[in-house]
Amino acid sequence: MEKYPINDWRFYLGDNEIAWQKDFNDENWQNVTVPHDWSITQDFTKEASSGTGYLPGGIGWYRAHVDAKELGELKDRILQLRFDGVYKNCQVWVNGYHMGSWASGYSSFQFDLTEILSYNTNDEIVVAVRVDHTDIADSRWYNGTGISRPVAIVSSNPVMVDRYGVTFETTSLNDTIASVKTKTAVTNLSGVKNTATVKQTLTDAIGNTVTIGESQITLEDNEIYEVQFEAAVKEAKLWRPQTPNLYTLATTIISDGKENSYEEKVGIRTFEFTADNGFILNNKDNVKLKGVCLHEDAGCFGTAVPKAVWLRRLLKLKEAGCNAIRMAHNPHSQILYDLCDELGFFVFDEAFDEWENPKNKWWQGHNVYPPKYEGYAKDFPVWHKKDLVDMVLRNKNHPSIIAWSIGNEIDYPNDPYANDLFNEMEGNNDANKPAEERIYNPNRPDTRRLTTIAKQLSEIVHKEDATRPTTLAAAFPELSYQTGLVDSVDVIGYNYKEHLYEEHHRLFPNKPFIGSENRHSYQNWLAVKDNDYIAGQFLWTGIDYLGESRGVWPKHGTYRGLLDMCGYETMMFYKRKSWWSKELTARLFTRPAKEKSEDPWEAVYRKWNYSEGEQVEIRLYTNADSFELKVNEERIALTFDEVEGYYSTIVPFVAGPLILTAQKDGEVITDTLKAVGQGQRLTANLWQVPTAFKTLLPQDEVIQQIELSIVDKEENLTATNQVIHFEGENCEFLGFENGDMDDITNYGEKYRRTRNGRAICYVKTKVAMEAKAMFSVAGFHDLIITL
């Protein structure tokens, strides 16, 4: 098998009824690289939807010109065009032939080109794709628009393994002796009866190889023959968060002297969700899942996020002690699953945010009525099985994935389902919901219908993969446990309902529980930490994201992350790290002392700047065994807040550095807060990929992630906000991000204002070609760095 990525495309924003024709003149179209998100390049507009980040969608066309000669010999080859995902409602033509369409923007799909390309007469293959995202209030968060995931043409010999045709499973584990099983669906498209040799090997990272099996088979024309092998792997290198060992599973098919070869990464591990003891890995490790929910946008990239950007983000989440990711609320790009395999994150993969009836879609601000009702619900009756099966088959060999979620908050109260067991229902964020929207209405769809659908979806999943449990994220379990909805899944997931854990564990003594979506509070973490039967939690959210905008225009995103959209650590990152991480951590923050706020996101500061004698609250987030805090050699006592989970005190301000020394297990670290002055200059830190992870990224070009800060004369980060301008040499500008949800500067502009004194700039450079980036700020010296 040979795979030929199609990266270079021409793009036109708008419709054209003849752009599908092979000889259509597209010379004046914009040149773009796929993956590509066209919405993120547009102007923010109040006419768009607040839910999807005030960015427009519309209709657009892509056309790619592929030199057939670059595909090698086409005679007697099977040719397939594969899309990892197009958001959304796309139609595809090849050389003017209409191949078909796909509704979902999250599913992969393919078309057979074998016959079409046999008619090719001028050695050019033209692929045309029409994308329709005119219903821009179709989601509760930003999804981007366009060919946002990779595209490739795959060329194979006629006796072949089709995509997702290989299944790998660890069937048992005895210490380091693993039993593994593979299933390989071999397809004969040669036109005649044929024989083939099938061989599979498993190779670890240092080249040790085990033969899984070898077999001779005979296939009738157009037959799919399943080959099964079982083997023992001695001294198996197990996949676990601390050491996410991966193997290369190689499959070779030889027929008529022609060979097809396939490779993918797999991991050897077993796991189990238990009703009383949570999550068990590899038969012995009791692991508490410390998870976050993630949407798949990354600020200026929209949903077309490079792997290097995800790598930087995930490494920071890992530093906070995070070990699990919930893909909210749809299947994500393959690069994210690959990184979870490679970095050792557990994954809950999720299929749907709505089923056959639409949820409210906010388009004028969060919970501002009336809503709109666009979205996947209109496609669900026809497409749900195809999309669900695609998610499972595409991702079944990822060792990181430990559960399939069939839905998120499908049971959201009165949105749209209702039940006469409750005369009034209010959900997690319905503070502004009108009274008539909370009251039982018999004309709404009955919640019991959800139980029927859940059973059907679970059955579909179990048919495709019997090795992982199904789950769903229940929004209103007070009702759903009575209607049988949670009976339909193997692991019960509750969103924001920690107070029900104890009672419902008694009601369902044989069911495992997970916090599928949780707030950041200490008490919610203790509900997981102190109860063995709760497998873990998933915070909402790991990283700030576009859409689901709370507040009024121009606010176009949501602040709820351990990281902001730049990938910088928020206050919540350090608080969470003090609870989750085993490594010593200690971080000081201050704020003017005043009445305690109910908002856990109220601002705190990394500074020691106040008026003499002013009452100041000092907070310390730490997991230290002991610590000492001083100012001018005077010790300051801190008290642990059992409700909030941090140390604090209120003292009158005195000038002088605030110095902390913390210890744990013989390790010592310090943290210092000083008076922060006005911004004097711009500094840059070029984020370096850790050596251990360099092989995970493309080797021919580099995504440079330039962390920018405005500092005072003593190099302290300031809150000074000024506009930074970019100029480059031998590099491609990819975008600025500042994490400011009120900044509606077009992402295509080569300037952006800092937020809290910081921003990040992304550029692409070629390996072995010296490049430079220059940043200018009014009143500062220009900053030039070599890339």
Image (cartoon, grey):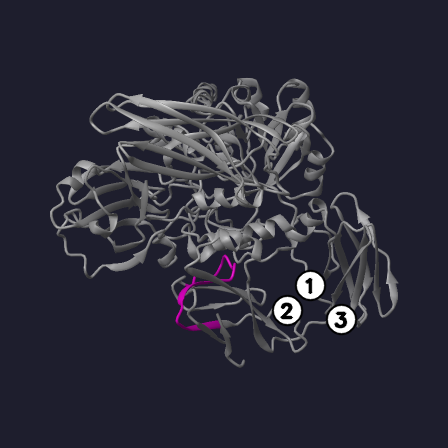
The local secondary structure at tag 3 comes to: loop
Task: In the rendered structure, find residue 611 and report the number of the disc placed on it.
Answer: 3
The local secondary structure at tag 1 comes to: loop
Residue extent of the magenta highlight: 724-745
Q: CA distance from mark 3 to mark 2?
A: 20 Å
Three-letter amino acid code of the residue under disc 2: Leu
Q: CA distance from mark 3 to mark 1?
A: 16 Å
Front residue of this view, candidates 757 and 56: 757
Three-letter amino acid code of the residue under disc 3: Ser
Three-letter amino acid code of the residue under disc 1: Arg
Query: Vertical placement of 192 versus 669: above or below?
Result: above
Disc 1: which residue: 606
Image-based side of 514 in relation to 226, left or right: right
Task: In the rendered structure, find residue 717 and report the number of the disc placed on it.
Answer: 2
Say if residue 189 shows up in the picture.
Answer: yes
Reading the chain from its start, which is encountered first: label 3 or label 1? 1
Within 10 Å of the Cα at label 2, are there few (<14), some (14-19), or many (20+) other Cα atoms? many
* Residue depicted at 36% across the width and 24% down the height: 216
Reading the chain from its start, which is encountered first: label 3 or label 2? 3
The local secondary structure at tag 2 comes to: loop
Q: CA distance from mark 1 to mark 2?
A: 9 Å
Q: Estimate the x, y position of residue 305 in percent, counting from the top left.
A: 44, 52
Front residue of this view, candidates 730 and 263: 263
Q: Is 734 a magenta residue? A: yes
Image-based side of 4 in relation to 301, left or right: left
Q: Estimate the x, y position of residue 378 in percent, counting from the top left.
A: 33, 32
Task: In the rendered structure, find residue 188 and report the number of the disc placed on it.
Answer: none
Could you tell me if the residues under marks 1 and 2 are in contact, i.e. CB atoms within 8 Å?
yes
